[in-house]
Amino acid sequence: MTGWSRRSFLGAAALVALQAAVPGGAAVLGKLDPKDAPSPRRRKFMRMVADHVIPATDTPGAGAVGTGDFVLVALAHGLEGTRRPPAANPALAPFVRADGSLDHAAWLEAKLGPKWLTLPPVRRHDALAALDAAAFKGDASAAPWRAIKGLILTGYYTSEVGGSKELNYELVPGRFDPKVPVTAETRAYSSDWTAVDFG
Amino acid sequence: MDESMNFDAIVVGSGITGGWAAKELTEAGLKVLLLERGRKIEHQVDYETEVKAPWDMPFRGEGDADLYAREYAVQRLNRHFTEFTQGHFVNDAQNPYQTGADTAFTWFRSYQLGGRSLTWGRQCYRWSDYDFGANKRDGHGTDWPIRYADIAPWYDKVEEFIGVSGAAEGLPQLPDGKFQPPFALNVVEQAVRERIMAQWPERRLTIGRTANLTAEKDGRGLCQSRSICARGCSYGAYFSTQSSTLPAAQATGNLTLITDAAVEHVDYDPKTRKVTGVRWIDSKTKTRHQATARLIFLNAGAFNSVHLLLNSASEAMPGGLANSSGVLGTHIMDHANTLSAAAIMPGFEAWTSFGNRPTGAVIPRYRNMETMDGVGHTRGFSFQGGALQSTWTAGKREAGIGADYKNSLRKPGPWRMVLVGFADCVPRATNRLTLDRTKVDPNGIPQLHIDFAFGAEENAALAQAKADAAEMLTKAGGHVMFGFDRPGPGGTAIHEMGGARMGNDPATSVLNKWSQSHDVANLFVTDGAQMSSSACQNPSLTYMALTARAAAHAVSLLKSSAL
């Protein structure tokens, strides 16, 4: 039996990283059934929505790392519970599919209105912030936003930028330190799987 | 039949106990055939997702939810099931089972070389005489034919081979073992331990005892604190068949391993009253094969070993192989399991931790020991859990967008502490496995039918666990957010056991004190099926110890020509 060292392990990880072109955006759309392929307008729309939730700061924002396309793919595959039929609500009814699930992207486009994309950035932000606030105050007509927002966070913090630049990522910690001082520079680890799953 | 298909022993199943049976029997000089129904997974070579980051995965580690709903409807509920690990769990659509109308049972399965040893939680706890004496004490089930003294040396042997890290605590209800150095409690857990002990000296929060190496062993590397064990570990840092028992068995030169071999029948000769061999279906080619042996060990996993015995009924044994008692399939158990309390733990904001410890903390049983202080129940419950910080996923539950929101998710979140209750499950005849006479699996074998329900004892235990957990975390300075007092569906704890219980009386039990069939002297069942009670601690270490003990006994019988 061959013992594995931390060095050989990291070497293997680097090989995997080389082989896997980072799916910046369009690459992930290849997972979609052609009939589910989003229009350029919808891709732009979801990219912009993602960027308002997680904008560029000293690290890139969600739009730049392909989160909009990830959200569309994730919605097409029912992630974040989006295949479950929504609670009965007349405001949602026009966007319910034949299988009972909600077309979240179409709903959000309609909810924000046809002009949202062309609004000045501040007004786009305000409109989205209002929707977000309503959703977290329990407004049933805004409820589907929570799943979309959840997917935006997933898309960003599981991207290479979100996971390893905005947060820290350590594939092989090599040790467990039970008591580490928090400093101004401390950042969470996206590779803290317990925190990700249960935090 | 091909002469090469004649062995001293056949072991059915290559998981936690099958690997042990193969190791012990081959090291004793027996020629052993190890049969595994699933595919071959080679250590270090076939852990396909081990080094991948979320951004390397098609669905970022979350997986294809629509696919999971269609084909992994049960397995997706397992906390270790992710896009990284889905290849280590069965496809439910291809491996169906049936449940009774009033049964909710989530049967978590891993059909592959190594079985669930690749995906297990690695927690290793000795049982005590509170556990082996439980049935006799309160009258549920049938008395165990063994006590702690019978198994203690075998616990020693197993712990020393697999490597178990843990802290000695001197508790009679959770005997200390041969431990490697423990992982540390984090800053919150250490404080909670001290605060609970100050209030209740008999309640001991301690680090989980886990089969992850904190000292190198037999060519296996140290645990790297990744806590992604279920992907497979090329360091060999946690116990699995691949990292430990299989290489030991292969080193003897006495092992023949066949994968993709779904055993459908154990053959029995009524003239000699012995089993003679097994028959299996090659899962890939759908061709049928057979082999003979002087000794057969069933280690297919508790429910699958029972399934095989039931399906091996013959004219001589119409109710199932080794079932003259009629109790085969009955008295199945799983720990009643729920999140008893979750609390915010203020006062530790200045601290975080580094690395992913591969174990939580535990509070061993403290009820119904010398004093029967359980309310509505006669057995024990224990807690597993620990303190953790939230991270970006907590943002899904919070209002906010924009730069400030993004920055708020940058640091580790507040400390929380969770205590998950595990309650002893009373053995009941009505909780049982049978063959479904109307539905077959893709190999044409009758599907397993599960009838299972928890009862008043488990509900009472979890009610007390909820109250106790809230009280302890509050006294420890926490603010309890919520807790539950009803168990999840059967199978949630992934400690399903029983169905071929041990006992002194052949009229009321399937196996004797050596895990040996009362009816068929050369047949041993040494996985979870043999258990007569459930205790409230994790059972795998006990399965392993009983397997090593049974193997030694079987070998002694073979060598003395008693078989």
Image (cartoon, coloured by chain):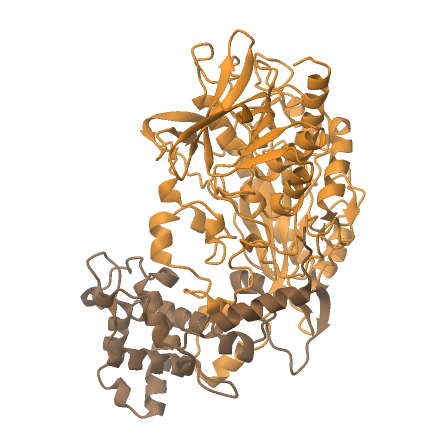
Q: Colour of chain A?
A: brown
> Is residue B203 something one can see in this rendering?
yes
Q: Residue at x 62, y 20 (%)?
A: B516
Using the image as rendered, state which of residue B176 and residue B278 is in the foreground.
Answer: B278
Q: Residue at x 43, y 79 (%)?
A: A65
In this figure, what is the number of numbered marks? 0
Using the image as rendered, state which of residue B366 and residue A30 is in the foreground.
Answer: A30
> Is residue B390 something one can see in this rendering?
no
Q: Residue at x 50, y 15 (%)?
A: B268
Q: Position of residue B360 (x, y in %)?
A: 65, 54
In this view, which residue lies farthest toward the top?
Answer: B271
Residue B154 is left or right of residue B297, and the answer is right
A97 lies above or below B1: below
Q: Position of residue B94 (x, y in %)?
A: 37, 41
Residue B501 is left or right of residue A40, and the answer is right
Q: Residue at x 29, y 60 (%)?
A: A86
Q: Position of residue B36 (x, y in %)?
A: 51, 36
In this view, which residue lies farthest toward the bottom?
Answer: A120
B423 lies above or below A171: above
Q: Name the image quarter holding residue B255.
A: top right
Q: Position of residue A71 (x, y in %)?
A: 36, 71
| On-image quarter of the C terminus of chain A | bottom right
Q: Colour of chain B?
A: orange
B514 lies above or below B538: above
